[in-house]
Image (cartoon, rainbow, N blue to C red):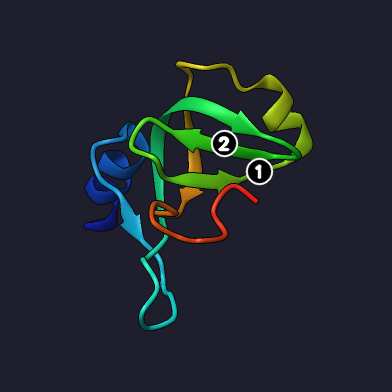
Amino acid sequence: MRKAPLLLLVFAGCVNVPLPHRSGEPAPSLERKQVAGKREPNELVATDGSSCMTTDTRFARAERGDRVWCVWRDTRGRLDAGK
């Protein structure tokens, strides 16, 4: 029963959930963020510069300004970001 309030906060968009990651890499997190742009073939870019890979359908439906749930990764400063 104690998990219910935490889940409510997560799904309301008030909390991000850090996910396991390799040492030295920025931790990905499941969050609801505002879309600032899109990169082909299926990458969404958030207003804070983080990005996430998504399905073709979700990519096609996402519009600039939409808030979407995704596993976001901080790709700012990476040499291969956007390629």
Badge number at residue 46 = none
Classify residue 27 as left or right of residue 37: left
Residue name at image x 33 percent, y 56 percent: 17
Q: Residues within 10 Å of mark 2 (few under 14, many from 20)?
A: many
* Mark-to-mark CA distance, 2 and 1: 7 Å
Residue name at image x 42 percent, y 60 percent: 28
Q: Residue 29 in the image: x percent, y percent?
A: 39, 55
Which element is circle 2 on?
strand
Residue name at image x 23 percent, y 46 percent: 5
Q: Residue 63 in the image: x percent, y percent?
A: 58, 17
* Residue, disc 2: 44
Q: Are marks 2 and 1 in contact (CB under 8 Å)?
A: yes
Residue name at image x 47 percent, y 26 percent: 35
Farthest residue, direction front = 79
Which element is circle 1 on?
loop
Classify residue 56 as left or right of residue 27: right
Classify residue 62 as left or right of residue 22: right
Query: Is 55 located above or below residue 30 in the figure?
Result: above
Q: Residue 73 in the image: x percent, y percent?
A: 45, 54
Query: Is 54 located above or below residue 57 in the figure?
Result: below
* Residue, disc 1: 54
- The answer to which of 62 and 47 lies nearer the viewer is 47
> Between tags 2 and 1, which lies in front?
2
Q: Residue 72 in the image: x percent, y percent?
A: 46, 49
> Which comes sooner in the sequence, label 2 or label 1?
2
- The answer to which of 1 and 74 lies nearer the viewer is 74
Q: Amino acid at mark 1?
A: Thr
Q: Amino acid at mark 2?
A: Leu
